[in-house]
């Protein structure tokens, strides 16, 4: 059965559950998938009965109460005879629900689950538009409200959202599932000395009057998107153009460093288009956030959110930009229908990122990054319990970065098997066929078989598609890209292990990637003299490169190296990126009576500076809560 349904085919499929074809006349409505594997168990929504197609937000951000409040008006597409629509909420205070004409509609908020929130069921009474009046809670999981002290400028507060994966239901009552794509508009009222930006077309870049001491900003997203990609930030923001369709937002004091690091962004967009077709989102701007941003980046359409930790002065970490840009095709254009299909998002994007880096910076750079990803994949497999562990399956709730690395290795293996020219032609056609639609793992494999393998039984057997997608561990045809530059680093690791002093190692021209290979390849148990030598020679505890510093601190923790503790505490209380935080706290917890009290003390101090999602995961790790 063809899983990937276009709107007209969806109408036919839904007729079996009572949806007539006339309801799907509008071509702008993205399809939902009706196969069992497309059912999202992390959403209360019942989209085959009634679904949201468009959201209009009219909200005010209140920094005093740490809430956003106002209304969300939604266009509803319902099956004939459908009585209700079910939305996702998390911690919202709903005051009333009306139809588009202002008439009250019956509604009920169901029992709450700590992770999923509570279903909001609205009686439709025949309407095609509902308006929910509500306010978020001060602890909304998607929102972080920063005092001035935690910003770069130290003068004004800051707000930003992080929607992935199911956090946006804490500030937007909608059907919060990646398989239910929606268009949207927004009007956001903020204090008059702050600027609001969102992941859509900026209609009023200078704001408009909204009462004493306030102004409003309006936004529009005409392409349907999964709800987790609706993003907001408010702060003391300025803008600098990087190219005809690219630019950077950040606080004024960070602008020069950020813009210098991002100078290649416009060319990256062109490079990506040369690989897999046109960029379809208009502008590609980036927002460099304060250090508490929990991820490296977030691919919000038209406005990628970036951690400031990628800024190292040498553009060594712009692979992060390439990754978020690649999501404009894989993830944003073609979206995983459910979160167990998340590798379709991250695995595709990690592969595409590496292709961008190769095209723009050359094969040696791309080979280093692919080789490091292989190291990360092996570490994740070991952490999951080995190659037989269920957690190493590609399809499912894969932890860590395994979905990124194993997914990219899968696609790279296909490329090497069928040839790059044939593979690139397929991927370009794949993005075209399924643009602005959801996808499942089974749907992707079906598409591969129909449009790439085409009945070639020998090729089918060679690729091992089902084993890659559904089996534990790593298939024996996995392609490992090996870097000559990193092989030379391995020689320096061996020399240090034999007793060569750090000062005699050949490291002067090393990139971040080479340093990471060196630090992560060192034995986890070193003598105090060796650790003193490394830190004294390379000043690792004081490195301004967060990637190197975190790798060094992991090694220091493994050896209970107390001279690094001041640097560890300073790092954990000034950086909010989960990629760095979780290994450090986990490392401390593994050190028993030595490390656990340190982890608990620093976490209690740093907790107010972390994003709510990071706090939740670290609380479970550090306190068992």
Image (cartoon, grey):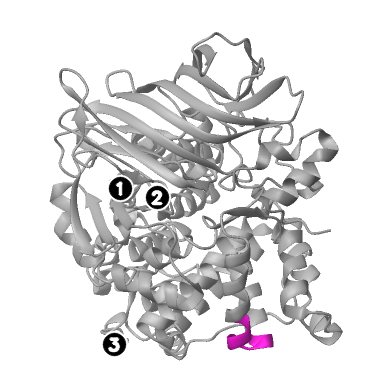
Q: Residue at x 45, y 49 (%)?
A: 578
Mark 1 element type: loop
Residue on which disc 1 sits: 291
Q: Residue at x 53, y 58 (%)?
A: 333
Mark 2 element type: loop
Q: Does the rendering let one see residue 360?
A: yes
Instruction: Report how many numbered discs are placed on residues in the image.
Output: 3
Residue on which disc 2 sits: 577
Relative placement, left or right, of 269 versus 156 is: right
**Magenta-drawn segment:** 416-423
Judged by its main secondary structure, the magenta piece is helix
Q: CA distance from mark 1 to mark 3?
A: 35 Å
Residue on which disc 3 sits: 504
Which one is in front, 245 or 315? Answer: 245
Corner quadrant of residue 182: top right
The tag earlier along the polypeptide, 2 or 3, is 3
- Quadrant location of the N terminus in the rendered image: bottom right
């Amino acid at each position: 059965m063809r899983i990937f349904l276009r709107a007209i085919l969806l109408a036919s499929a839904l007729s079996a559950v009572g949806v007539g074809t006339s309801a799907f006349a509008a071509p702008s409505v993205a399809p939902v998938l009706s196969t069992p594997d497309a059912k999202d168990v992390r959403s209360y929504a019942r989209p085959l009965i009634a679904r949201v197609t468009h959201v209009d937000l009219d909200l005010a951000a209140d920094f005093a109460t740490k809430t956003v409040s106002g209304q969300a008006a939604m266009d509803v597409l319902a099956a004939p005879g459908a009585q209700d629509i079910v939305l996702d909420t998390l911690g919202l205070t709903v005051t009333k629900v009306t139809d588009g004409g202002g008439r009250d509609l019956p509604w009920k908020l169901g029992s709450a689950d700590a992770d999923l929130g509570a279903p909001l069921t609205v009686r439709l009474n025949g309407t095609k538009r509902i308006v929910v009046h509500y306010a978020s809670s001060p602890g909304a999981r998607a929102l972080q409200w920063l005092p001035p002290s935690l910003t770069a400028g130290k003068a004004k507060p800051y707000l930003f959202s992080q929607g992935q994966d199911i956090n946006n239901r804490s500030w937007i009552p909608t059907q919060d599932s990646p398989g239910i794509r929606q268009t949207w508009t927004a009007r956001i009222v903020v204090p008059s000395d702050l600027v609001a930006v969102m992941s859509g077309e900026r209609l009023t870049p200078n704001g408009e009057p909204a009462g004493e001491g306030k102004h409003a900003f309006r936004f529009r997203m005409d392409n349907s998107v999964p709800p987790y990609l609706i993003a907001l930030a408010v702060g003391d923001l300025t803008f600098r153009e990087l190219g005809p369709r690219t630019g950077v937002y950040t606080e004024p004091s960070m602008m020069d460093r950020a813009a210098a690091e991002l100078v290649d962004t416009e060319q990256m967009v062109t490079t990506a288009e040369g690989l897999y077709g046109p960029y379809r989102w208009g502008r590609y701007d980036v927002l460099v956030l304060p250090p508490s941003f929990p991820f490296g980046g977030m691919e919000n359409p038209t406005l990628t959110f970036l951690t400031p930790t990628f800024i190292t002065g040498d553009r060594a970490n712009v692979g992060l930009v390439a990754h978020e840009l690649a999501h404009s095709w894989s993830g944003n254009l073609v979206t995983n229908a459910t979160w167990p299909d998340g590798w379709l998002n991250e695995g595709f994007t990690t592969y595409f990122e590496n292709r961008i880096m190769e095209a723009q910076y050359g094969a040696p750079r791309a080979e280093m990054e692919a080789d490091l990803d292989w190291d990360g994949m092996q570490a994740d497999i070991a952490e999951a319990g080995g190659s037989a562990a269920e957690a190493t399956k590609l399809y499912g709730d894969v932890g860590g970065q395994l979905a990124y690395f194993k997914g990219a290795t899968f696609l790279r293996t296909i490329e090497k098997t069928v040839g790059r020219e044939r593979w690139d032609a397929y991927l370009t056609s794949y993005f075209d066929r399924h643009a602005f639609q959801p996808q499942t793992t089974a749907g992707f494999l079906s598409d591969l078989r129909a449009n790439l393998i085409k009945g070639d039984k020998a090729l089918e057997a060679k690729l091992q598609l089902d084993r890659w997608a559904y089996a534990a561990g790593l298939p024996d045809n996995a392609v490992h890209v090996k870097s000559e530059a990193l092989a030379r680093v391995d020689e320096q690791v061996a020399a240090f292990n034999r007793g060569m002093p750090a000062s005699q190692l050949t490291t002067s021209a090393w990139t971040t990637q080479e340093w990471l290979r060196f630090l992560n390849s060192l034995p986890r148990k070193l003598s105090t003299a060796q650790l003193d030598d490394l830190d004294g020679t390379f000043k690792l505890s004081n490195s301004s490169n967060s990637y190197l510093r975190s790798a060094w601190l992991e090694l220091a923790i493994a050896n209970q190296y107390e001279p690094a503790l001041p640097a560890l505490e300073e790092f954990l209380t000034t950086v909010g990126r989960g990629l760095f935080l979780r290994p450090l706290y986990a490392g401390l917890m593994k050190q028993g009576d030595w490390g656990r009290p340190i982890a608990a003390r620093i976490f209690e101090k740093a907790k107010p500076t972390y994003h709510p999602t990071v706090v939740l995961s670290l609380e479970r790790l550090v306190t068992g809560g």
